[in-house]
């Protein structure tokens, strides 16, 4: 049985607090385990969350500010220590290649893991994920080069039992029809309907820009920074961040199903304020992320 869920490893911005670790998010999506923006303490948070490095198939960095990448050395070394047998792909802004090299080689260790660097360049990039689908990366608006990520599952087809019965197709012949696309004059499209693929988006440090909306468009689960409350919108703009109100407006205008707010400034101590502000703009499912939370991707419609 496939598992699609977000495991939140940390939700703080800039500095950790007593209740919030630095960033870290593990998306479990069928055979893929995508680790986004591991900040300091990610290894320990994974232990608390009950997930191992063997579940990681990709490391995806949005940018190279410390709260989004200083956990890389520990995670990379742990991959070798645990002798993770499969290749692990690393995606990050190509302009930060030197930073990634320093993080990867931060101290002495015996490297046995197969870590394959695949830097991202340009305003948009497409990263194939095999049968799972693909990752889209889009450049955001932050004082340093930063990217957001969007996972898109291919559309499939849902079989319609009444039409199969009317066409006289049953048992093993159903599988034959699915494999060949046509059987005894019956096309697969005649006895099925499109099943829309699920979608996920991860948007960190950025001001509002077209890329934010493109990443969020009709996703089932949107994880998005809301560093500030809207009373501090001027600060958000100055430092290249979003407010909870802006993030919720993106979700509302983009047809998002479940909204996850995260990356909170240490200046705020009451998470309910983020939920209240978001609810003013977005009538859907809003979750204010907390460390070690497990958030399922909504079931198919």
Image (spheres, rainbow, N blue to C red):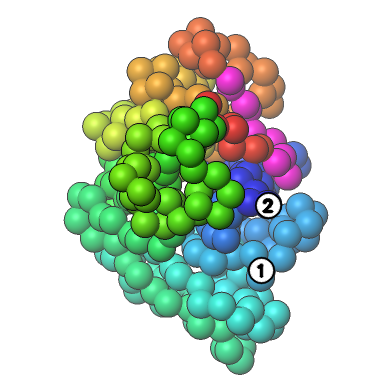
Labels in figure, total:
2
In the rendered image, residue 171, in percent from the top left (x then y), is placed at 58, 49
**Closer to the N terminus: mark 1 or mark 2?**
2
Task: State left or right for residue 189 relative to residue 204.
Answer: left
* Viewer-side residue, 55 vs 193: 193
Q: Is residue 85 visible?
A: yes
What residue occupies the far top of the structure in this picture? 280
Q: Nearer the viewer, residue 35 or 208?
A: 35
> Dot 2, crowdedness within 10 Å: few (<14), some or many (≥20)?
few
Residue located 64% across and 33% down the image: 289
Q: Which residue occupies 55% across, 38% down?
A: 263
Direction from residue 18 to residue 96 in the image, left or right: left
Q: Is residue 15 visible?
A: no
**36 displayed left or right of 80:** left
> Badge 1: how crowded within 10 Å, few (<14), some, or many (20+)?
many
Q: Position of residue 207 (x, y in %)?
A: 33, 32
Based on the displayed image, in which of its 4 quarters is residue 251 positioned? top left
Position of residue 174 measured from the top left corner of the image (x, y, whole percent):
50, 48
| Label 1 close to label 2 by CB (< 8 Å) | no
The image quarter in which residue 142 lies: top left
Q: Residue at x 66, y 37 (%)?
A: 295
Q: Give the CA separation, mark 1 to mark 2.
A: 20 Å
Q: Which residue is mark 1?
A: 53
In the picture of the structure, the residue carrying the numbered disc 2 is 1
Under circle 1, the secondary element is: helix
Percent position of residue 96, x then y: 33, 65
What range is drawn magenta here?
285-294
| Up-down relation of residue 242 to residue 25 (above or below) | above
């Amino acid at each position: 049985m496939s598992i699609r869920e977000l495991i939140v490893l940390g939700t703080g911005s800039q500095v950790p607090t007593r209740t919030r670790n630095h960033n870290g998010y593990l998306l479990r999506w069928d055979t893929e385990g995508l680790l986004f923006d591991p900040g300091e303490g990610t290894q320990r948070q994974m232990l608390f969350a009950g997930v191992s490095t063997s579940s990681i198939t990709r490391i995806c960095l949005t940018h190279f500010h410390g709260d989004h990448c200083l956990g890389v050395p520990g995670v990379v070394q742990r991959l070798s220590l645990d002798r993770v047998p499969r290749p692990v792909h690393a995606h990050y802004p190509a302009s930060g290649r030197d930073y990634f090299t320093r993080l990867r080689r931060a101290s002495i260790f015996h490297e046995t893991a197969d870590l394959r660097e695949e830097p991202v360049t340009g305003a948009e990039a497409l990263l194939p994920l095999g049968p799972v689908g693909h990752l889209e990366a889009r450049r955001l608006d932050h004082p340093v080069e930063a990217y957001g990520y969007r996972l898109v599952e291919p559309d499939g087809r849902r079989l319609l039992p009444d039409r199969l019965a009317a066409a006289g197709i049953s048992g093993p012949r159903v599988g034959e029809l699915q494999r060949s696309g046509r059987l005894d004059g019956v096309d697969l499209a005649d006895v099925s309907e499109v099943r829309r693929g699920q979608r996920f988006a991860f948007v960190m440090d950025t001001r509002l820009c077209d890329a934010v909306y493109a990443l969020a468009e009709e996703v089932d689960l949107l994880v998005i920074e809301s560093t500030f409350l809207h009373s501090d919108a001027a600060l958000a703009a100055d430092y290249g961040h979003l407010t909870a109100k802006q993030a919720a407006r993106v979700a509302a205008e983009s047809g998002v199903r479940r909204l996850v707010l995260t990356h909170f400034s240490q200046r705020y101590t009451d998470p309910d304020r983020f939920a209240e502000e978001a609810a003013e703009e977005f009538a859907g499912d809003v979750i204010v992320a907390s460390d070690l939370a497990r958030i399922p991707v909504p079931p198919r419609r």
